[in-house]
Image (tube, rainbow, N blue to C red):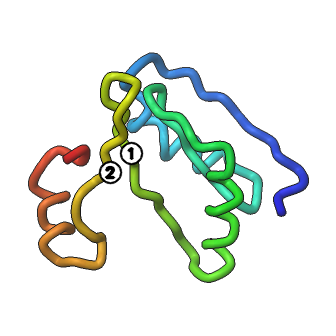
Amino acid sequence: MIKDFFSVFIGSGARNGEIYRHEALQLAKGKFVCYLSDDDSWFPDHLQYMEQALFKADFVHSRYMAIVNKEQMMAIQGSFEELETRDRMLKESYKF
């Protein structure tokens, strides 16, 4: 379990975080790096699951759930293991 949790906030304004990810990685000093954009939120146990996954891999990325009208959750369709899904991610908006 992650016992020492330290976070750094890089304020870049709404919808501008993507261009600052490289800077954030350069500043990172911890064992793990996790990012959260201005319009995102994590479930309370998200970091615990990410830590468990990192014991089995060098890199992990989670799927996202879209919240619709504060009542309905919608998951991304397709599997990252499928070539069709990866091709679609390259050609369309990343939030399909």
Tell me how far mark 1 sits from mark 2, CA to CA: 5 Å
Q: Badge 1 is on which residue?
A: 65
- Name the disc covering residue 75, or none: 2
As drawn, the residue found furthest toward the right would be 3
Residue at far front of view: 71
- State whether residue 37 is above or below residue 46: above
Q: Is residue 90 above or below residue 92?
A: below
Question: Tags 1 and 2 in contact by the CB under 8 Å rule?
Answer: yes
Near-viewer residue (72 or 19): 72
Q: Position of residue 28 (x, y in %)?
A: 68, 49
**Circle 2 SS class:** strand
Name, please, the residue furthest toward the top: 13
Question: For this rendering, which residue is in front, 6 or 96?
Answer: 96
With 43 as the anchor, is 71 left or right in this view?
A: left
Q: In the displayed structure, would residue 91 be above or below residue 22?
A: below
In terms of depth relative to the viewer, which is nearer, 73 or 65? Answer: 73
Give me the residue at 68% from left, 78% from top.
55
**Residue at position x 34%, y 39% from top?**
66
Residue under the point 56% across and 44% down? 35
* Figure quadrant of residue 95: top left
Direction from residue 14 to residue 25 in the image, left or right: right
Q: Dot 1: what SS?
A: strand
Three-letter code for the amino acid on which mark 1 is drawn: Met
Upstream in sequence: badge 1 or badge 2? 1
Q: Quadrant for residue 70, please give it.
A: top left
Category of crowding for the residue at label 2, using alpha-carbon neighbours closer than 10 angstroms: few (below 14), some (14–19), many (at least 20): few
* Percent position of residue 17, x then y: 44, 32
Q: Is residue 15 left or right of residue 5?
A: left
Image location of residue 69, percent across then percent down? 32, 22
Around disc 1, counting alpha carbons within 10 Å, would you say few (fewer than 14), some (14 to 19), or many (20 or more)? some
| Mark 2: amino acid | Ala
